[in-house]
Image (cartoon, coloured by chain):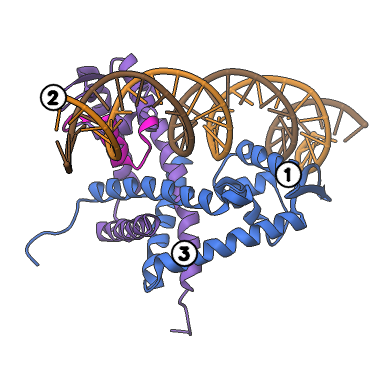
Chain colours: A blue, B purple, C brown, D orange
DNA sequence: CCCATCATGACAATATACTGTCAATGCTGC
DNA sequence: GCAGCATTGACAGTATATTGTCATGATGGG
């Protein structure tokens, strides 16, 4: 050690924030590219992937993704027009229909997820997954602290 | 250890991706809120903060922030209309004027940065800054790998 | 049963970003 | 110098997200 190599907390957070902004943009751009010829932007196949296991309401998808219900509603309406999803009846709520994948939607999503998996494997080959998981855990912790703080 | 607690690389990256999307949105929302009464959105004071030490061209700011030049140009034009910046002559390029803070811009930025610092200190109080720095370093590494991959 | 409250979908306005295109400027190699 | 290429600002079009408002459907307390 050649002295104090510890960043002040504030600077560390600022650096992380800048990195998150850049990384976010990069991930969206890659996602857009991977789905381009299938007509699936990042926003679209993120909605599709939210309901791959079980149909959910628009509001539920929005909560999972940390977006507003209106944003997801807009994308879902577009996906419905393009027959990638259908709104199915919700036994528990007449208005809040469930976003459900069509066969076309499921096939398109599978295709883009396969590409995404290949891409991820290529990019992160050889990295210890614990390092990735640790970064995710740190961000989760910060996010939860912020939620707590903001709800005061 | 109670067995294999290691996430497959792919799942770790997917989890990190989702967290980054949520965190990104959360940070932008907080930034918007902190500057609201000053008329400074996240996008605006990010541009201001990019030139706090030295004037830079729009293209340079865009590169630093990982955005397109057009996005930054738009915000910079708005900031110029509101007298928070002025475009000063660039001795090295006649068209590429330098984004330079006005006194008003510097004062507004100082105010919002002070609030942001207070907010950060409250949210991350007690956290080891090495953990934050490690997360930032991980994301930097991934970002650089992606850049390399994408430029092939 | 009714009323207050909450959740939801629809609609409108706006902010932030992207892509693409063009003309003007700057730069490099010959 | 000039020809070719890269950079820049301006403009147009679009995608993604936000906020706000309203009417309708759902729910729980009196």
Q: Nearer the viewer, residue B13 or B148?
A: B148
Q: Quadrant of residue B24?
A: top left
Residue A113 percent across, percent down from the top left = 58, 61
Q: Which residues are magenta?
A: B53-70
Would you place residue A6 above or below residue C24 in this image?
Answer: below
Residue A118 percent across, percent down from the top left = 51, 66
Per the image, the residue denoted by label 3 is A120
Would you place residue D4 above or below residue A124 in this image?
Answer: above
Residue A18 visible in the shown view: yes
- Of the 4 image quadrants, the one containing the N terminus of chain B is bottom left
> Disc 3, disc 1: CB below 8 Å?
no
- The structure residue drawn at horizontal position 29% and vertical position 59%, both measured from the top left corner, is B137
Per the image, the residue denoted by label 2 is B91
Residue A46 percent across, percent down from the top left = 59, 51
Would you place residue B114 above or below residue B100 in this image?
Answer: below
To the question of a shared chain for discs 3 and 2, the answer is: no
Residue A84 percent across, percent down from the top left = 72, 50
Mark 2 closeness class: few <14, some 14–19, many ≥20 residues within 10 Å: few
Give me the C-alpha separation between circle 3 and circle 1: 28 Å
Task: Tell me the mark number nearer the camera, choosing from 1 and 2.
Answer: 2
- The structure residue drawn at horizontal position 53% and vertical position 48%, both measured from the top left corner, is A32
Give me the C-alpha separation between circle 1 and circle 2: 53 Å
Would you place residue B6 above or below residue B21 in this image?
Answer: below
Chain under label 2? B
Task: Tell me the mark number nearer the camera, choosing from 3 and 2.
Answer: 2
- Of the 4 image quadrants, the one containing the C terminus of chain B is bottom left
Per the image, the residue denoted by label 1 is A82
- The structure residue drawn at horizontal position 37% and vertical position 74%, both measured from the top left corner, is A126
- Apparent side of residue B38 relative to residue A91 in the rendered image (left or right): left
Mark 3 closeness class: few <14, some 14–19, many ≥20 residues within 10 Å: some
């Amino acid at each position: 050690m050649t002295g104090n190599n510890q960043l002040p907390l504030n600077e560390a957070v600022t650096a992380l924030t800048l990195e998150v902004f850049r990384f976010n943009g990069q991930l969206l751009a890659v996602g857009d590219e991977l789905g381009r010829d299938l007509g699936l932007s990042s926003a679209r196949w993120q909605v599709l992937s939210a309901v791959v296991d079980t149909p959910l309401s628009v509001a539920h998808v929005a909560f999972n993704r940390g977006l507003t219900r209106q944003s997801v509603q807009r994308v879902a309406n577009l996906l419905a027009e393009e027959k990638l999803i259908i709104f199915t009846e919700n036994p528990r709520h007449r208005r809040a229909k469930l976003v459900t994948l069509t066969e076309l939607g499921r096939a398109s999503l599978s295709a883009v997820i396969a590409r995404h998996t290949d891409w991820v494997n290529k990019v992160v080959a050889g990295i210890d997954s614990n390092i990735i998981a640790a970064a995710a855990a740190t961000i989760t912790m910060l996010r939860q602290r912020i939620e707590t703080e903001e709800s005061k």
